[in-house]
Each structure stands twice: as C-alpha cells, then as structure tokens.
C-alpha cells in the first residue's frame, strides 16, 4: 500500500527552458524578442525592466509586466501548476514568471493599486520566498 501525504501540498513547478533568456543575455532588444516570441515571460520581464530603467511611465511598466504575468500563468498551467504551490527561484526557467510578478506588484503599488500590490507581493512570497527576497526584499 502506498502512503500519500495529504499535507505535503503540490510539488514545485519547473518551467521548461525559455530560449529567449539566452537571446536577451546575448544583447537582443527586448521589444524585438517580444515580437518574435510573445509568449515568453523572460521577454516581457526584460521589456518591463527596460521601460522602468528608461524612466517610462509606471502604467507602461504595469502593462508590460501584466502581459508577462498572464502569459506566465498560461505556461505554468501547461506545466502542471494547479493555481498554487511553489515556483522555485532556484530553477532559472521560472525566473521570467517571478520577475513579471514582482514587476507587476511594484508597478501596481506605483500607480496606487494597493489591492493588486498586496495580492501580487503575497503571491510572489508564496510562490518563492527566495524570489521575494531577491526582487522585493
């Protein structure tokens, strides 16, 4: 008889490698990568970060990070995620999603969307305490 630990919670979700991460690390422009790979969380995170770093309006950063967040949710679900559970920062392919989530939280706070800031920052902490510490801590 197999013992099942009902209190263990869902297993960690590990997204597949996103080839856009290497492209972006190689210096490709985030907007070009988004145009070629609009489902890539890494591309949307890079675009949102670039907008933020270039001084774009907080609404622009919010919009880019929200698109990346929703594209990430689609990818997470396709890879077995059931709406909760760990998405470890230590697994590098998860970082596109986690960066989008952190940017969404920060830009929500910047535009005065307090409930969204609270929900997203809590979601980040629940998904990966290490990501929370690295990105919001």
Image (tube, rainbow, N blue to C red):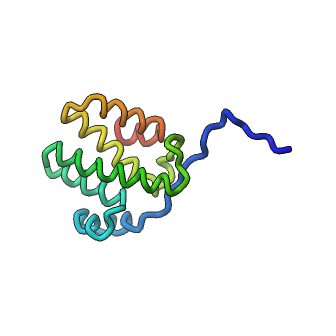
Is 63 on the left or on the right of 96, as rendered? left
On the image, the x and y values in percent for residue 121 come to 37, 34
Q: Residue at x 15, y 52 (%)?
A: 54
Residue closer to the observer: 45 or 116? 116
* Residue 72 spot, x, y in % from top left: 40, 53
Q: Residue at x 67, y 33 (%)?
A: 7
Residue 71: % across, % down? 37, 55
Which quarter shows the N terminus?
top right
- The image quadrant of residue 115 is top left
Quadrant in which the C terminus appears = top left
Determine the residue located farthest toward the right in the rendered image: 1
Q: Position of residue 130 (x, y in %)?
A: 46, 40
Horizontal side of residue 48 vs 7, given as left or right = left
Please report the residue visible at 53 percent of the width from the left and 41 percent of the height from the top: 85
Tell me what residue is drawn at x 45 percent, y 53 percent. 94
2 vs 44, nearest the viewer: 2
Q: How many marks?
A: 0
């Amino acid at each position: 008889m197999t013992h099942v630990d009902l209190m263990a919670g869902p297993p960690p979700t590990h997204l597949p490698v996103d080839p856009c991460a290497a492209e972006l690390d190689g210096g490709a422009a985030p907007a070009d990568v988004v145009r070629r790979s609009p489902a890539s969380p890494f591309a949307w995170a890079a675009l949102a970060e670039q907008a933020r770093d270039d001084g774009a309006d907080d609404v622009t950063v919010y919009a880019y990070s929200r698109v990346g967040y929703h594209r990430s949710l689609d990818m997470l679900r396709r890879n077995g995620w059931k709406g909760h559970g760990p998405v470890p920062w230590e697994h590098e392919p998860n970082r596109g999603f986690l960066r989008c989530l952190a940017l969404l939280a920060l830009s929500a706070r910047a535009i005065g969307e307090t409930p969204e800031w609270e929900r997203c920052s809590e979601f980040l902490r629940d998904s990966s305490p290490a990501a929370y510490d690295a990105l919001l801590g």
